[in-house]
Image: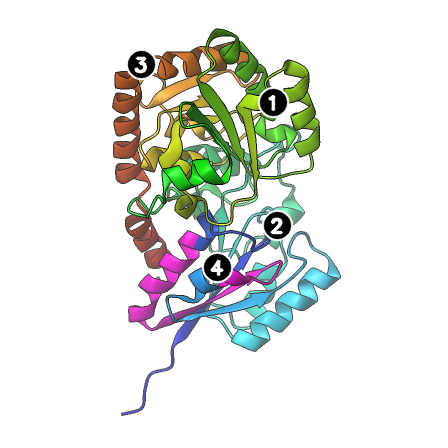
């Protein structure tokens, strides 16, 4: 008997493949669950995955990697490269994410034999974009899109308001994390970044850009360190503002209590989560989800997060952490100080966060819902 032909999902992720993060964990788990159903996965980044990232993505065995450097917008280069990819892989399903849903891809795909096009909406909204409304031409262009899957209820509300995709063609599947991953060696993390053993770590994982509120974090750090000196504020991530923020820390006189780790290729394995006592997330824009917060919750950390975007769906004030108005560094400092001075509170809130991660953000269970969407 002839072997049946395997089918394929083409997954375009509009980001550089420079670390093992949320997209990579999602893609690898998706590939594992598609495999026994007779499907393969092609993942297309804007840069070539290398080293540990490449190994992680290829591990399931049914994954092909490719590159499309330009993925945003409606430009000629974007369009021609997409056509080449579709003709090369002949996918049954197109899945794409980040950079917004408006592309020529669903329309072109329908003409080239792609049966379904799905957009994974996990895009944070800037203040400028928050009030966007699609016109009739955009709505007509996007009619071939079969469905939009939203990372949170907040994203679903944004999508419904924007009207790029009809409300009837979008739904929520929470983004998720691997709740059973190895969290690495806390002592090794401290040693690598020269963090004293007698200082509790307050951790933020994000790009070092204004949208992530690094200045708010530093102002709060100064307030906290004025009251107690047994904390170290650790930032995992990089960005154009790093030197500016380092200068602010020096100006505040807290540079010795601030650690800049840069981009950590595999954060979980690095020991960062295991070493931390408190997580903060100081976002100033409307976060779609914030995978870093879900990862911290999964690791059992209490979280102090800004009340904006999808973050309140993750952090319930008083249950698994505290929330504060985005620019209120005094309230952020108060939350940190409450947790720093009360080990029982840290443990109780951390356990509640872990429970929420298991209930709402479990990678295998949530990806199983994705598989039902893709091969419907």
Q: What are the residue bounds of the magenta stretch?
A: 25-54
Question: Magenta stretch containing residue 315, yes or no?
Answer: no
Residue 88 position, x and y percent, is 57, 76
Q: Is residue 103 above or below residue 352?
A: below
Badge 1 crowding class, 10 Å Cα cut-off, few under 14, some 14 to 19, many 20 or more, is some
Question: Are circles 4 and 2 on residues that touch, CB within 8 Å?
Answer: no
Element marked by disc 3: loop
Indicate which disc residue 56 carries. Answer: none
> In front: mark 1 or mark 2?
1
Element marked by disc 2: loop
Mark 3 highlights which residue?
342
Badge 2 crowding class, 10 Å Cα cut-off, few under 14, some 14 to 19, many 20 or more, is some
Say whether disc 1 or disc 2 marks the residue closer to the N-terminus.
Answer: 2
> In front: mark 4 or mark 2?
4
Residue farthest toward the top in the current orientation of the protein: 227
Residue 124 position, x and y percent, is 55, 36
Mark 2 highlights which residue?
102
Badge 3 crowding class, 10 Å Cα cut-off, few under 14, some 14 to 19, many 20 or more, is few
Question: Are circles 1 and 2 on residues that touch, CB within 8 Å?
Answer: no
Mark 4 highlights which residue?
52
> In front: mark 2 or mark 3?
3
Q: Is residue 192 left or right of residue 86?
A: left
Element marked by disc 4: helix
Element marked by disc 1: helix
Quadrant including the C terminus: bottom left
Q: Residue at x 36, y 18 (%)?
A: 317
Residue 265 position, x and y percent, is 51, 49
Q: Is residue 61 above or below residue 376?
A: below
The image quarter in which residue 345 lies: top left
């Amino acid at each position: 008997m002839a072997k049946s032909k395997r089918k394929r999902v083409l997954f375009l992720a509009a980001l550089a493949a420079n670390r093992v993060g949320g997209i990579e964990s999602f893609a690898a788990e998706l590939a594992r669950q598609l495999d026994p159903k007779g499907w393969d996965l092609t993942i297309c980044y804007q840069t070539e995955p290398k080293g540990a990232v490449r190994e992680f993505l290829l591990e399931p065995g049914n994954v092909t990697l490719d590159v499309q450097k330009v993925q945003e917008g409606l430009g000629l280069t974007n369009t021609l490269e997409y056509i080449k990819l579709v003709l090369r892989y002949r996918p049954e399903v197109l899945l794409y994410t980040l950079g917004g849903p408006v592309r020529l891809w669903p329309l072109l795909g329908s003409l080239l034999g792609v049966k379904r096009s799905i957009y994974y909406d996990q895009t944070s909204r800037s203040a400028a974009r928050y009030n966007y409304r699609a016109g009739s031409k955009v709505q007509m262009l996007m009619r071939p899109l079969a469905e939009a899957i939203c990372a949170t209820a907040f994203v679903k509300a944004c999508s419904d308001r924007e009207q790029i995709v009809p409300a009837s063609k979008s739904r929520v599947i929470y983004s998720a994390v691997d709740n059973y991953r190895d969290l690495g060696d806390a002592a090794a993390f401290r040693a690598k970044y020269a963090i004293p053993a007698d200082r509790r770590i307050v951790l933020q994982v994000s790009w070092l850009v204004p949208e992530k509120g690094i200045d708010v974090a530093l102002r709060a750090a100064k307030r906290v360190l004025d009251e107690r000196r047994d904390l170290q504020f650790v930032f995992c991530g990089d960005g154009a503002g790093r030197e500016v923020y380092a200068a602010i820390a020096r100006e505040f006189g807290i540079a010795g209590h601030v650690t800049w780790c840069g981009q950590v290729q595999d954060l979980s394995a690095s020991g960062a989560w295991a070493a931390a006592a408190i997580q903060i997330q100081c976002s100033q824009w409307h976060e779609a989800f914030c995978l870093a917060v879900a990862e911290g919750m999964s690791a059992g950390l209490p979280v102090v997060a800004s009340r904006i975007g999808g973050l309140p769906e993750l952090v319930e004030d008083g249950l698994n952490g505290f929330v504060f108005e985005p620019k209120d560094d005094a309230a952020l400092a108060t939350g940190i100080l409450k947790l720093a001075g009360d080990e029982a509170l840290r443990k109780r809130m951390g356990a509640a966060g872990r429970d929420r991660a298991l209930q709402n953000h479990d990678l295998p269970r949530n990806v199983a819902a994705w598989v039902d969407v893709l091969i419907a």
